[in-house]
Amino acid sequence: MHIDVNEKALKEGETVDALLTELIHTKKLDLLLIAGDISNHYLRSQHFLEDLQQSAGIPVFFVPGNHDYWSKEHDVKDTNQVDAYFRSKKESLVEKPTHLNDEWVLVGSPGWYDYGYGNHEKYTEQQFEKKKYKFASWNDRHYVDWRKSDVTISQQMLEQLRKDLTAAGDKKIILMTHVATHPEFVVSLPHRIYDYANAFLGAKSYESLYQDFPNIQYSLMGHVHFRKTYRDQERTYLAACLGNKRHWSHKDVRTQLIKTLTVIEI
Ligand SMILES: [Fe+2]
């Protein structure tokens, strides 16, 4: 959603909170899922979630995105501390499979990129680890510090997801990650920039979850700044990203929210 970056696109008197509340009521939603990147400050992101629930009167569930973890506007440099903060909040789905009813369960994790979607014929693992190569730079390198490698954190989050998905048993699952976990949701290669940058869009190793857990009926993702629904025989994959106002043809938050919000009926 990037509510901070998109703030300048709001009309006088508008707030994202109020616009979204109006939309939630119009669509008669029972709950709202947000797949991360609310803002560049963890407190602002969390307060947004709390205020929105207050104004809309429905539960809102969330997994943090890389921007919610950013330490650009505060001094908490250890990303694990920001992660612990989000985990302590009821809105976070991380390690908390949430049963919606007798049939459906929500399972979530930020997920972390494992460079798997980058072009490994063109770049080495070390070049991806640097998160900067000539013209391309991935800004997480300045503002996210897990104190371990991206591949390690990606694997740890994958293992936790496996536990949570196993705990869901035979129920139908709505899986929500921040990063892309399906090749349809990264940029097609070859591409001048994305041969490199695709490495940071998704976690290719997470594709294994779809084989191992056929009861995943919906797979929701954030992170990529486009909106897309893809269906195969097994399930529906969905990215419903408000994105950054730079990418909007029509610079109006209300219109973009209406275009973005996707309703799932269960
Ligand atoms: Fe992101």
Image (spheres, helix red, strand yellow):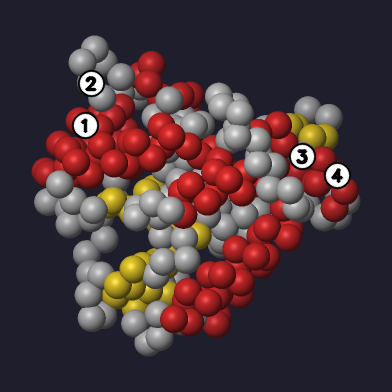
Q: Position of residue 6 (x, y in %)?
A: 41, 24
Q: CA distance from mark 4 to mark 1?
A: 42 Å
Pointer 2 residue Cβ closer than 8 Å to ligand 1: no
Q: CA distance from mark 2 to mark 3?
A: 37 Å
Q: Position of residue 233 (x, y in %)?
A: 43, 77
Residue 1's image quarter? top left
Asked if labels 4 and 2 touch by Cβ distance under 8 angstroms, the answer is no
Quick one: label 4, few (<14), some, or many (20+) residues within 10 Å? few
- Residue highlighted by disc 1: 19
Q: Position of residue 21 (x, y in %)?
A: 18, 38
Locate the C terminus and report the quarter of the image it occupies.
bottom left
Amino acid found under the numbered disc labelled 1: Leu
Amino acid found under the numbered disc labelled 3: Lys
Q: CA distance from mark 1 to mark 2?
A: 7 Å
- Residue highlighted by disc 3: 131
- Residue highlighted by disc 4: 127
In primary-sequence order, the first of circles 4 and 1 is 1
| Disc sitting over residue 71 in the figure | none
Pointer 3 residue Cβ closer than 8 Å to ligand 1: no
In primary-sequence order, the first of circles 1 and 3 is 1
In primary-sequence order, the first of circles 2 and 3 is 2
Q: CA distance from mark 1 to mark 3?
A: 36 Å
SS at mark 4?
helix
